[in-house]
Image (cartoon, helix red, strand yellow):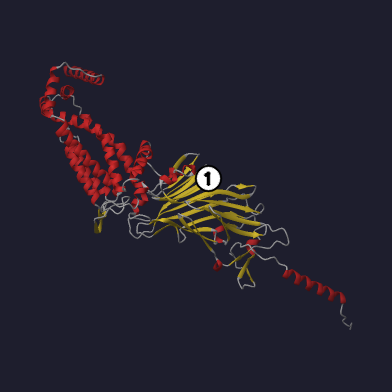
Amino acid sequence: MEENKIDPFQIIGFVILMAGLFWWINTIPEIDQVIVENESKNELVIDQPDNSLLVLNSELSNSFDLKEKDQKPFIESRSDSEEEVIIENEDLILKFSSKGGQLIEAKLKNFTDYKGDPLYMVKDGNQNIDLNFSTISGKLINTSNYTFKPIVNTKSDYTTLTMVLSVSENQYLNFEYVVPKKGYMMDFSITSSGFKRVIDYQKSILLNWDLKAFRQAKSIEYENRYSQLYYQYDGEDTDYLSSYSDSEEKEDAVSWISYGQHFFNSILILENPINDVSFESKKLFEEESKKALFTKNYTSLIPMDLNNSEFNSKMNLYIGPNDYDILKNQQNNISESIYFGWGIFGWINKFIYFPLFGFLEKYFSAGLAVILMTIITRLLMSPVTYKTYVSQARMKVIKPEISELNEKYKNDAIKKQQETMKLYNKAGANPLLGCVPALFQLPVFYALFCFFPIAFPLRGKPFLWADDLSSYDVVAELPFSIPFYGDHVSLLPILASIAIFFYTMMSSAGQMQPTQPGMPNMKFIMYLMPVMMLFFFNNYASAFSLYYFISNILTILIMLMIKHFIIDEDKIRLQIQENKKKPSTQNRFQRKMKEMMDNAEKQRKIQNKK
């Protein structure tokens, strides 16, 4: 048997191998990057001098193109090492989490909710902003599942928070937030390096923005009406999803997306317009409830453009009040996310009522500003009220003669119409003027109907017994809920309805009612309006009820002044008698009407002869 001998070359090789291994262990660079959270079951636990547990995610590291032999796979802390960063400016307190690199809490320092508690726009996981893409190896990456490393850099005018998701020494993904010293607008950007041969560019690369909107008002149904997803596209056009039902949409050339929450807003502003953006809005409650916490769930899927095969997207994120005075000073016309009203009504609000109310509120309380705005509006409309009441007074004077004509020509409708028109012409009366106030007030009424719910300066402002002019006032709570009315009694709508009732009585006193069969009873309809308003206004902004109450009281006073101090009915009667003696003069319209009636009369006579 051959005797075993010790090979000196084996000994030398073993010593060199051990020395090399010892050198390599002691020269490993310190890992200062925090990378993606482990999702697989293949975990390698590495002991560190500080006894922290670091996880090697072998599955995810294989998804990336690591070419250099000395390039280490990314390593990250377990979930129990998640870090939180708080950044505060004059208006906001923001909390960010290393898990997903996201904003997890946003508190508005200068506002409270309807219960008087601190007002949060983001809290308890109600918002999610993450990036979704596929790697070449086929793995789907969702950044909300991974842990970033936060780096804070504070300057005199702003604070920068960079969330770093490291893949290797030369591969990383950054979420960067720049929070100014004051204000509600922050910069938000996504950048990467070393991802050129990592991402599967044939598949969608999407930024997902999801938000469950917190309830901020006493009536969730009322708040829901004015909580909408708005977006701007094609440079200046805006559109929105329904506030009453679940809806979705897809649009091209989108510049910004607004998640409206009635008096508050979250707006994502894109640096460049993006195509194929998908939106969705879902209602999160079934009916009026005091326990419901959320109004809507908003979701947007935004395709991301790559610059030279890398992420390089800059955006802005607004989280704050839906206040026109604040939003109008921001970029990209994001103030258009406030619904001022359709067409001319929106122009009336934007260029008349908002500036007027803003001016009055500088010197008076919100309630007094509403009253003064009402007085100014009624005074400007008083010439129309005057002409209307003069016409009504003339109609009242000739009412007996109208009744005689109706009886005399009850079997001849055309003749009756001709003689009635002659009498109107002699008396200088126009029955159509009774409709003028309603027609003239319609744009103003609808403009104010849109103004008061979105007037942010009214929010939380008390007046008399109303503790918030932007919401309904309560003088009594009901133990049950009445359909279309609610579970409470509001006093201002009652006062407004009473004022409407008396105004209706006065304005309809001299009007002639239609005698033709089948025609509706206009008096009944007019008296029904106050009852309808009572039900409608009970859950509406108390400022609108205050406006309508004061407006009708002023109109009644103006009509009484015209009746007792300006118009003399005896004088009108004498004037009518004098006009009857004068030769009849007709304008072009009256001549045309007479010609048509004469032709109709001729045709009737021809038919009778046959």
- Relative depth, front residue between 232 and 94: 94
Report the residue at 35% width, 60% height from top. Answer: 291
Say whether residue 432 is left or right of residue 405.
right
Q: Quadrant of the N terminus?
A: bottom right
Q: Few, some or many C-alpha atoms within 10 Å of disc 1 (few <14, some 14-19, many ≥20)? A: some
**Residue at numbered disc 1:** 276
Rendered position, 432 above or below 272: above
Report the residue at 24% width, 58% height from top. Answer: 478
Q: Position of residue 533 (x, y in %)?
A: 25, 45
Say whether residue 595 is left or right of residue 221.
left
Report the residue at 27% width, 48% height from top. Answer: 537
Q: Can I make out residue 473 in this image?
A: yes
Q: Quadrant of residue 566?
A: top left
Q: Position of residue 219 (x, y in %)?
A: 33, 54
- Relative depth, front residue between 516 and 149: 149
Q: Quadrant of residue 272?
A: top right
Q: Position of residue 493 (x, y in %)?
A: 24, 48
Residue found at the far right of this picture:
2
Q: Can I make out residue 510 in this image?
A: no
Rendered position, 109 above or below 423: below
The mark total stands at 1
Query: Residue flagged by tag 1: what amino acid is it?
Result: Asp
Rendered position, 86 above or below 495: below
- Relative depth, front residue between 421 and 564: 564
- Relative depth, front residue between 401 and 460: 460
Helix, strand or loop at mark 1? loop
Q: Position of residue 399 (x, y in %)?
A: 12, 29
Q: Quadrant of the C terminus?
A: top left
Say whether residue 573 is left or right of residue 221.
left
